[in-house]
Image (cartoon, rainbow, N blue to C red):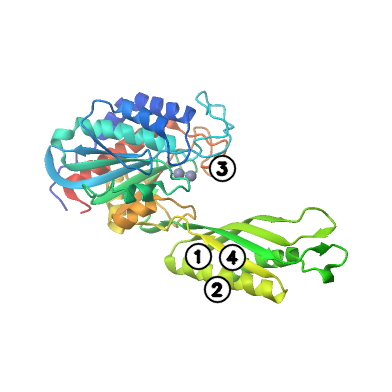
Amino acid sequence: MNDVVDTTSGWIDAAQSVQGDTIALRRAIHAEPELGLQTPKTMAKVRAALAGLPLEWKTGKSTTGAVAVLRGGKPGRTVLLRGDMDALPMPEDTDVPFKSTVAGTMHACGHDTHTAMLASAARLLCAKRDSLAGTVLFMFQPGEEGWFGAKLMIDDGLLDNPKPDAAFAIHIMPNAPAGTLGSKAGPMLASSDKLTIRIRGKGGHASMPHHAVDPVPVACEIVTAIQVFVTRRIDIFDPAVVTVAKIESGSTNNVIPEHADLLGTIRTISEESRQAVHAGIARVAENIARAHECEAEVTIDLGFPVTICDARAVAFAQQSIEGLFGKESWETMPSPLMGAEDFSYVLQKVPGAMLFLGVCPQGQMWRTACPCHSNKMVLNEEMLARGVAAHCAIAERFLQRGLG
Ligand SMILES: [Zn+2]
Ligand SMILES: [Zn+2]
């Protein structure tokens, strides 16, 4: 298959040797979480952890993110590793000693661990610089949680020179067995669009609805009809999820309100069903409203596109992980998840893959552990060494042989 000696085995020990620093950096970031596109304190912690290393730092105007460039001792391919940095606007209700000190802000999606794992991988790969043939890009990215940070860093030209030949990211997952890594070829995460519908009627006295145009039952009918539309008109093998998560209307018990508002999310795993759902929701909402002499105004704000993993990159990652930790450490995902990721923008430009790393807390069942975005999400920090070793092995192996 190849004549390249597999040198990945040393990465497990190397990752263990910096595990104390990985955890310390993760906890420092966790205690001081930042939101959105500006994460300067987090970036400063990374820069301090990597001070003095042979990295060139590229920054852009749109975010505080940076790409650290490691040029190996010999020329060759370029591989990108990505870690996101931002937290979520929500309270933390864990009892860890490094709990968030910023009210209403929590690293509940594990981006603190992604940043720390990437920093340790950068340190270890720097130590091997002379033997690396090619370039490693470490993408420290703020603004993943709906802020389009990855897209903005691309638009700022941070992935242009040198351009990566492949890109990989690792996302932790408390709802997977600790230590397993996995992915799937093709669509892996969904597109995510925001749905807003305003149904306009005519206000009036609640006792005399025939003198008004009541938007409330029309809104209810639209919520139900959207679900009928999705199951009847969307191919079950190219699925869509539409959830109306918020209904808002009215002010009191005896007044028919002027309008009713629906707010929800649209998830699909192909551009075809994404377009079909957008058109179908507008058709259903507008026509139901018209049937009842209301008007529906449908607004769809486009979010992240579908995250599509390159089949060769997934096979490559699987071989790398199995070579490192053994066959039982890899889990091919049976189906996509309907969550979304802005790493999708990187994968639109560059073949690559996102991997999930199981970090189910010790003593818990992975199926029932608090998931990402839970106010009680905790994780098994011992597994971070696996993520560090995986980053290093994937980068080194890609520089040695490409996707093969
Ligand atoms: Zn998240
Ligand atoms: Zn995340």
Question: Mark 1 or mark 2, which is nearer the start of the sequence?
Answer: 2
Nearer to the camera, 347 or 360:
347
Position of 78 with respect to 284 (left or right) is left
Residue hosting label 4: 298
Quarter of the image that includes the C terminus: bottom left
Say what amino acid the circle numbered 2 marks: Arg
Task: Report crowding for label 2: few under 14, some 14 to 19, many 20 or more residues within 10 A (C-alpha).
Answer: few
Mark 3 or 4, closer to the camera: 4
Question: What residue sits right under mark 2 in the picture?
Answer: 233
Q: Which residue is mark 1?
A: 239
**Residue placed at 35% from the left, 38% from the top?**
387
- Depth-wise, is mark 3 or mark 1 nearer the camera? 1
* x and y, in percent, of residue 286 in the image: 63, 72
Mark 4 element type: strand
Q: Is residue 255 depicted above or below 130 in this figure?
A: below
State the image coordinates of residue 20 (x, y, percent, origin top left). 36, 24
Q: Residue at x 57, y 38 (%)?
A: 90
The answer to which image quadrant residue 180 occupies is top left
Q: Is mark 1 within 8 Å of ligand 1?
A: no
